[in-house]
Amino acid sequence: MNLESATKYFFCKTQSFTDAPRCTGDTLTGTDVMGAFGMCQSEAELGFKAFLGKLSLSPEDSKRAIQLLSTTG
């Protein structure tokens, strides 16, 4: 899974009701992805905030990335 496809977990989705069972196997769930995002943010906050700021998910992420860039170095 690449990072660009993982950003879909930040946006609301509509519910879909189906009688098809979920596939089993080595698939990542939303919980797995959000857990990975949390670990990434705790270990490499600058990189994660810069990535989210680049995607314009929130203005706070862009501001925080600039703040981190100006204080490190």
Image (tube, grey):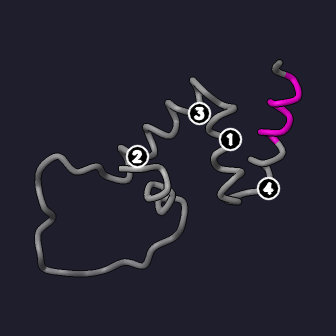
Q: Label 1 amino acid?
A: Lys
Q: Tell me which residue sits at (43%, 39%) in the image.
A: 35
Q: Are marks 4 and 2 in contact (CB under 8 Å)?
A: no
Left or right: 17, with 62 as reference point? left
Q: CA distance from mark 4 to mark 2?
A: 22 Å
Q: Are marks 3 and 1 in contact (CB under 8 Å)?
A: yes
User: What is the x, y in percent for residue 32?
Assistant: 35, 43
Q: Nearer the viewer, residue 33 or 21?
A: 33
Residue under label 3, please give it: 41
Q: CA distance from mark 1 to mark 2?
A: 16 Å
Is 37 in the magenta? Answer: no
Left or right: 13, with 25 as reference point? right
Residue under label 1, please give it: 49
Among the 4 quarters of the image, the one containing residue 69: top right
User: What is the x, y in percent for residue 56?
Assistant: 71, 60
- The 10 Å Cα crowd at callout 2, few under 14, some 14 to 19, many 20 or more, is some
- The 10 Å Cα crowd at callout 3, few under 14, some 14 to 19, many 20 or more, is some
Residue under label 4, please give it: 59
Q: Label 3 amino acid?
A: Gln
Question: Of circles 1 and 2, which is in front?
Answer: 1
- The 10 Å Cα crowd at callout 4, few under 14, some 14 to 19, many 20 or more, is few
Give the mark, 3 or 2, whose residue is nearer the N terminus.
2
